[in-house]
Amino acid sequence: MSNDKTQTEITADNSRRGFLKTASAAAVAAGAVGFGLGLANNAHAASPTPPKEEPKKHKLLLIKNVNVFDGVNDKLLMGMGVLIKDNLIEEIGKKFTVPKGTEIIDGGGRTLSPGFIDIHAHLQLNVGPYEFLSAPMDYHGALALWEAKNTLMRGFTSMRDVGGSVWGVKRAIDEGFFPGPRLICSGSVIGMTAGHGDYRTVNTFPRQLGGPAETEMERLGMTYFADGVPEVLSASRTVMREGAAFIKMFVGGAVSGVYDPLDVAEYSFEEVKAAADEADRWNTYLAVHTYTDKATMTAIEAGAKTLEHCNLITEKTVKEAVKRGCYISAQTGVYLSPPPEGFTPAQVQRQQEAADGLDNLLTLCRKHKAKVGFGSDLLASLELKELLPTEFTNRTEWFSNAEILKQATSINGEIIALSGPRNPYPGKIGVIEKGALADIVLINGDPLKDITLLEDPNKNLALIVKDGKIYKNII
């Protein structure tokens, strides 16, 4: 049997009934944990039956006549076939005994790759700062569902969300109501007064000094303000109670911050260590937002495992990160793209400062063989998020095509695995190997030779499979 060579792509409006239910769920989940009995987001009650317009699922699916990039090796495995059973890769080889009833797709000599992973994304942040703070929560949920579908259609079958409340969106995707990538989430980011994430006016006092018990950023699920070790512990335990896969903390200044220039080191060693130790007790890890040597070294010594951004660190800190087994979660497009609408002159200047540090950072990372993650951090605009595929070509100034593809697949898969038992999707991703989860994309051409192919996913991604289900087929 062979496929009928018609396009099979799930559209954003595949179920109005499901959409309304999910948008409502997203709105509720944006500010709350569970319902009634306080159930965690990953331990909810029985759900309604998903709509009929689910992606096509096969108990057995064979994709033959493909050249396999397995996520690990620099060269393609030529003329192979990949057998998928349910949601797992069952076998890889050149000859198969094909069981009766197997769906067969002829890849026509195309390149089969693991599904891509965005290791630094904010699915909730799709509008500018003022619109974000003033729009209804269910509006954010609706846009997040829309962008989740777009992200999957760009070939990204997994996304690590490093700040925001997308629990309802994640649940709707996992239950089959909407197409989207696997979401591995931190939930609200832990931030200090005057640090990144603090968008309060100077006339709004912290709650310790008589201010409101909850601010807009906390209500929207973006940030938990925590000052001092006891509050950091409470915030860390709260995000884990909500179902977080890992803990995220702002430990340095920010491009988009209001009160914190890039040179600021936020949080003391003791406060960062409190979060890292709490993550360890939950058998997961701490991810930190950081730019400078001082902030980054404090986080490394306190036990953080992934270092987000790091544009302004020096060789000494890169070497220490490698020595301690930390991952450097780098991005390029967010700095090289136009400033988001509403950026102040100071924020525009900081974006340029961060962009100027990219060459030194990534040159040092390659020199010392640091494990570099592939992330986007594109936010505040759906139009900017369309630039996600340019992250592949931006990196060619520092890395080979094979190195870039490994960053977007197997290295990012290793970062996801740091969550251990807190990973909501047990199984291996980012590789094509026996027993791995069946998240794959089929590419028209060879990205090891021409990575610019990935800039046009609509044209050059012929097949997208997530969890063994076909979401796109234009072969």
Image (cartoon, grey):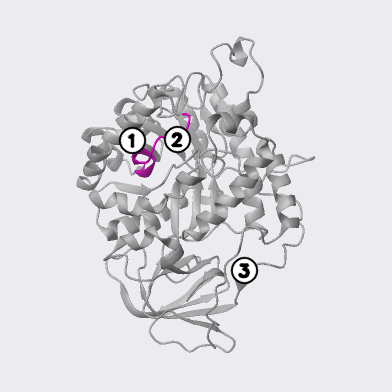
The answer to whether the residue labelled 2 contacts the one labelled 1, judged by CB atoms less than 8 Å apart, is: no
Which residue has dot 1 on it?
A: 310
Of tags 2 and 1, which is closer to the observer?
2
Vertical comparison of 438 with 208: above or below = below
Corner quadrant of residue 256: top left
- Which residue: 36% across, 34% down? 300
The answer to whether the residue labelled 3 contacts the one labelled 2, judged by CB atoms less than 8 Å apart, is: no
Question: What's under tag 2, amino acid-wise?
Answer: Pro
N-term mark: 3 or 2: 3
In percent of width and height, residue 371 lies at 31, 48
Disc 1: CA contacts within 10 A as few (<14), some (14-19) or many (>=20): many
Q: Is residue 181 visible?
A: no
Question: What's under tag 1, amino acid-wise?
Answer: Cys
The image's mark for residue 340 is: 2
In space, the residues marked 2 and 1 are separated at their CA atoms by: 21 Å
- Which residue: 48% across, 46% down? 383
Left or right side of 267 for 310: left
Q: Nearer the viewer, residue 191 or 346?
A: 346
Q: At numbered mark 1, what does the secondary structure look like: helix, strand or loop?
A: strand
Which residue has dot 3 on it?
A: 55
Question: What's under tag 3, amino acid-wise?
Answer: Pro
Disc 2: CA contacts within 10 A as few (<14), some (14-19) or many (>=20): some
In space, the residues marked 1 and 3 are separated at their CA atoms by: 39 Å
Vertical comparison of 80 with 358: above or below = below
Give the magenta part as a residue range: 329-342
